[in-house]
Amino acid sequence: MVKKYRSQELDAVYGALANSTRRKILARLVNEPCSVGELAEPFDMSLAAVSKHIRILEKAGLVEKERRATTIICRARMAPVASAAAFVHFLEQYIVENRPLEQQPAVERPLEVIDTGF
């Protein structure tokens, strides 16, 4: 079965996740919603630069913002990540199914993350 993936959606998600600062922001938001100021605290960059990273995550559908008085609260949206992960899984299945038998490992394992620093 071939599943259709929206190219623009995947491009936006993978583009957003290609930057370590954005991955760190998203990882923090998975745990709890945060204000833009709270998200900016651990980074050695301006609030404007962090806001730009957040806008990229928002355009990719990975973050949604809500205004509460003078504070902007951000929260993670995981649906686009699930779509991107499904595409990677599709590729894994293709590789496994089309690899010559002598090249297949005894036990198939999912892809492992090598850089744990996001």
Image (spheres, rainbow, N blue to C red):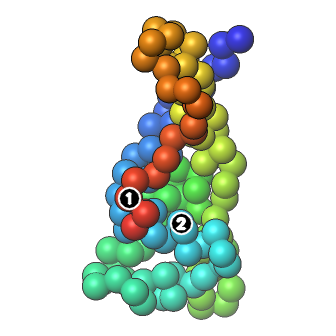
Q: Is residue 39 left or right of residue 93?
A: left
Q: Secondary structure at mark 1?
A: loop
61 and 83: which is toward the camera: 83
Residue 97 position (above or below residue 79): above
Q: What is the three-letter code of the residue carrying label 2? A: Leu
Q: Residue at x 54, y 68 (%)?
A: 27
Residue 63 position (above or below residue 97): below
Q: Residues within 10 Å of mark 2 (few under 14, many from 20)?
A: many
Can you tell which mark lies on residue 115?
1
Q: Residue at x 66, y 44 (%)?
A: 82
Where in the figure is residue 95, as x and y percent of width and height? 50, 19
Give the quarter of the figure containing the N terminus: top right
Residue 75 position (above or below residue 35): above
Q: Residue at x 60, y 82 (%)?
A: 34
Can you tell which mark lies on residue 26?
2
Q: Secondary structure at mark 2?
A: helix
Q: Residue 48, can we see it?
A: yes
Where in the figure is residue 17, as x and y percent of width and height? 44, 53
Residue 3 position (above or below residue 80): above
Q: CA distance from mark 2 to mark 1?
A: 16 Å
Give the quarter of the figure containing the C terminus: bottom left
74 and 24: which is toward the camera: 24
Dividing the picture into quadrants, the one containing residue 31 is bottom right
Q: What is the three-letter code of the residue carrying label 1? A: Asp
